[in-house]
Structures are given as C-alpha cells and as structure tokens.
Image (spheres, helix red, strand yellow):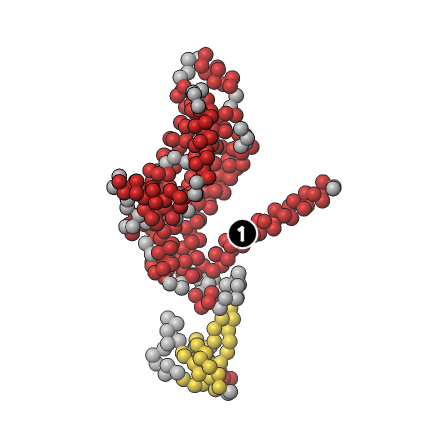
Amino acid sequence: MHPIISKSIIYFLLAVCGLFMVVPFIWMISTSLMTQSEFNKNDAIFIPKEEYYVWNKDGVEHKIILVTERGSESVIHVLDENNQIAAEYPEYMSVPSSEIEFVKKKPSIHLDNYTRAFRQVPFATYFANTIFVSIVTLIGVFLTSILAAYAFARMEFKGSDFIFYLFLSMMIVPQPVYLISSYMLLDKFNWLDTYYALIVPWCVNIFTIFLFRQHFKSLPQELFDAASIDGCSTFGMLWRIVLPLSKPIIATASIFSLISSWNSFMWPLVMVDRPELRVLQVGLSYFNQEASTQTTLLMAASTFSILPILILFFIAQKQIIASYSRSGLKD
C-alpha cells in the first residue's frame, strides 16, 4: 500500500477515535450552558437554544406557558420575571391563539448555571479537600516510588526480581476485592472519617514504581561507575544523577497520580462521611441527589471540576511523550 494512503487511513481512524473521546466533553459543556427546560426536551442538541411562547397584548410581549389549544382560543399561564406564574393574571386564562407567538433563540447560552452550582453545594470546600489530598498523596507516592524503583533498578539483592514481579502482580487485583478488608484495617487504626484514610493507603503506587524502575534501568551504567569512582554515595547518585535526568518521568507520574486522586470516587465515598472532608467527586454525587433532576447544574459543576486537571495535562503533555520516548516500557 502506498505510504500516503496508509497514513491517510491511520489519520482517519485516529480522527474517528478522537471524535468519540471528545463528544462526551462537548455534550457536557453544551448541557451546562442550557436551561433545565431545554435539556428536558431531549432533542440531543449540542448548541443550546431557547424556545418559548409569548403572548402579545397591546404590543407588549408576555412570556407564557401554553397549556392547551382549543381552536381559536388557547389556555395559558403568564410568567413573571422569575419565570413563575404571574400573580396579576389568573392561573388559567384563555386568550386568542392569534396573539400567541412561538420564539426560538439560537444559540442560547446560560452561564448562570455555574454560579448557581457553586451556591447550592460547598464546592470551594470540596476543591480545597481534593487539592490537599492530591498533593499530599503525590508527595507520598514520590517518596515511596523513587526509593523502591531505585532499589529494584540499581541495587542488587537476593530475590529482587521475584519481589518486584510479585509486587507488579498486585496491579491485577481490582479495588472492590480489598475494599472491605481495607475498611476494617483503617477502622482498627481509628483512621476512618479522617484525612489519613484518604491519603496514607494511596502513598504507594505500583504503576508509578514500575514507571520509575523502567526509566532508572535505561540510564547508562557509566554514569554510576564514574560517580562511584568520585566517591558519590548511593543516595548521592540518586539525588545528583538520577533525579535530574528523570524530569519527564516525574512529570508523567505526577499527572497520573493527580488524575487518579482527583477522580477517586469509591474510596472516599466509603471511607469518609463528614461533609467537611468530602472530595470533589463525592461532592458531585451528593449534588446530584440534592439537586434531583438539575442536570444542567450537575454538568456545570462537572465542567469546572475537571478544568484544573485538564489544564495541567495540556501543560505537561510534552513531558509525558518525552518520558515514553526516552525510557520505553520494555524490560
């Protein structure tokens, strides 16, 4: 096959896959800009539009709800400025159908969903808790992962490969399997409903250890031999040689860890009950229950909840690509 044709096919398939990934985000943002009545019409629209009826009386337009049409007459509710049934008019009143007009505005964007979402649920507290838990967990992950990966990659001890692969096999255990046992263990420590339960169990990340180990193994042995001749200690090699050469892999591990902490839902939902300790994803679920069918507010809250992690990903995407191109994932 001609290289141009094969490249075109690859680009087409990538574009289709990318479209499938992007459409849910577009729908979420679009829904966050609608009114609830627009969303309830279930027209599967991506561009918000506002549709309503007006009653023209003596050249003045009144926004109304059309209840029913009876030939030349229509039964309506007249609305006030707050979209409530106006008190100065009868609840059910009949007017000539010729005085009623259907209005469609397109596009119709309602940014007030974002301010209303913040007012209904204490998202500032949820944001602060999520940022605190994510950053402290990231520090813990770095401490454990760098030391463990350096030991597995650059230090020789009996059974190191067996321990590493045993460690690696734990990645296949799904979270629901150890959720109950972890709950009972944290209860023994009296850590339930505290920050300890949200942070400490996640300070060891096996995948991050794997990433760092693969990168550390790819570094030239000559660097360590030269440092050893110069009298550099084991910790000195890690601090002065390995870490300065690991900036891309550190950026990648940071993004993965932050995304994992930011999107964590099941664990904090089970381990924490106090509202002041809720993280963002748990707050969204409670917001859904409290706001009932207010889907537009929920989508607005979801949009600004993913915004920080999305910006962070775009800033560090070059480092992520560089980390894979330099270290690879092969053993």
Q: How many marks?
A: 1
Q: Secondary structure at mark 1?
A: helix
The front one of 116 and 162 is 162
Quadrant location of residue 63? bottom left
Residue most extreme to the right: 2
Looking at the image, which residue is at 50% across and 53% down?
Answer: 25
Instruction: Assess disc 1: are there few (<14), some (14-19) or many (≥20) residues with their C-alpha within 10 Å of its C-alpha.
Output: few
Q: Position of residue 138 (x, y in %)?
A: 38, 37
Q: Is residue 61 visible?
A: no
x then y, percent, for residue 132:
34, 42
Q: Amino acid at mark 1?
A: Val
Outermost residue to the left = 190
Task: Give 271 or 21, whichever is nearer the viewer.
Answer: 271
Residue found at x 49% / y 59%: 30
Q: Residue at x 74, y 41 (%)?
A: 2
Q: Quadrant of the N terminus?
A: top right
Q: Is residue 138 above or below residue 296?
A: above
Q: Where's residue 60, x and y in %?
A: 44, 79
Is 185 on the left or on the right of 154, as rendered?
left
* Res 17 visible: yes
Which residue appears at 41% of the width and 47% of the height? Answer: 263
Q: Which residue is mark 1?
A: 22
Question: Left or right of 285: which side holds 192?
Answer: left
| Relative to 156, residue 274 above or below | below
